[in-house]
Image (cartoon, helix red, strand yellow):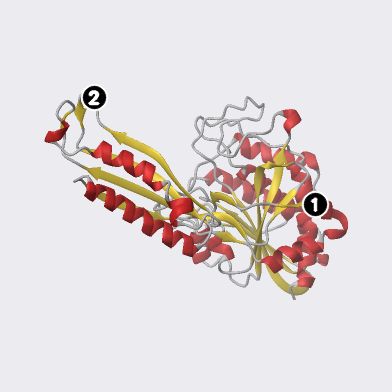
Amino acid sequence: MAVDEKTLIGYRRHLHQNPELSCFEHETAKWIAKELKSFGLHPEVGEHGAETGVVATIVGDNSGPTIAWRADTDALPIEELTGAPYASCSSGVMHACGHDVHTAVGLGLAKELSGRRAEIKGSVKFIFQPAEEGVPGSGIVGAEAMAQGGVLKEVDAVLALHCMPDIPAGKIGYSDAAVWAGSDCWKLTVKGVQTHGAYPQNGRDPIFAAAQIVTALQSIPGRVVDSRDCCVVSVGQFNAGTTFNVIPGEVKMVGLIRTLSAEVRERAVRAFKDIVNGICQANGVTCDIDISRGAEPVVNDASLVSLVRDSVAKEFSEHFVPAKPQMGAEDFASFSSRVPGAYFFLGVRNEERGIVHPIHSPHFDVDESCLPLATSIFSAALLRLGNQLQ
């Protein structure tokens, strides 16, 4: 049941025009299940801890391991500005992270392999996971919910990919180690004493203290944390005051910490608290700190990455390029921390066509030639890994 480029593009564009936010992918799940049924599969919807998750397994004619392929399905609360004829039909919602591509590739693989059971040693389990974009502190959703729900039962390895607009279409990025950063969201309230702006000595200025905090936090990467270790600390919101002549009583700030290892994370979080508490004490103000732990770092299993590359080296070796880890976050670690995982980057960039915008941009788009390439490479890999993992 070979899949052609037109079909793959059709999958992607349908999904792109009909995006749904995290945990609300109800129509998306129904549509995915309908397509899987048309391949002769028996999808499970709403099981394994995720109401809008879809899982389908192809059992081969020969014994062997179970390899999972994961695709995420949710979109982002972004108003699309691409002007494409297949642009989102849902106001304020857009597949700006390429999950439409990931799902289209997953469907393409399922269609391809459903007609090749005689060649499959073991089983291939397709996991269409919702809520990958869940924010830290929002509860157990997405990959973690499905992992806790038993979706990895009897799974021996798991593979996935992500659109990467820094890599040209026609290439697949790989890493033998870290792929995505761990994510922490912090919320900070600096509490002072309100006073007239002309008489700052009569109050305690939380803005003055908070401004020092913004600057001092940038000493964590490269000063507290070894400059050879990756660490990002960013301030995303700084809210205070209502008028020009009053120093407010408090400042609210929100931001993130991103790291590639548990050790660096621990050091960065500890330094964050020390810096904030120290500056507040020095300025006679107080603070409330709330740090929510999000996704863990995604670290590839080097031997599994090598097996995937080696399995398709004869036809596709020239398509693989080394890729640096990303400081963005992904919840795939909920899978790859439980079973060996290999995560790849799918090149989607085409400068001649102006397809250069980053993920989470309202202008994000992809060169759709990436779809048949990914399907060809990873269908071959999934077929051959059954032999190599036994």
Type of the residue with mark 2 = Thr
Image point (32%, 56%), residue name: 274
Mark number displayed over residue 234: none
Q: Is residue 352 left or right of residue 46?
A: right
Q: Is residue 338 left or right of residue 68?
A: left
- In the image, residue 365 sits, relative to residue 267, either above or below, namely above
Type of the residue with mark 1 = Ser
In the image shown, does 100 or 215 lie closer to the viewer? 215
In the image shown, does 390 or 359 lie closer to the viewer? 359
Q: Is residue 380 left or right of residue 363?
A: right
Q: Position of residue 320 (x, y in %)?
A: 77, 53
Marks 2 and 1, how far apart in space? 60 Å
Q: Earlier in the sequence, mark 2 or mark 1?
A: 2
Instruction: Categorize mark 1 by other alpha carbons within 10 Å: few (<14), some (14-19), many (20+).
Output: some
Q: Position of residue 19 (x, y in %)?
A: 56, 38
Instruction: Categorize mark 2 by other alpha carbons within 10 Å: few (<14), some (14-19), many (20+).
Output: few
Image point (40%, 52%), residue name: 138
Image point (80%, 58%), residue name: 380
Image point (68%, 52%), residue name: 323
Residue 363 in view in this figure: yes
Label 1: which residue? 376
Mark number displayed over residue 243: 2
Q: Position of residue 389 (x, y in %)?
A: 74, 73
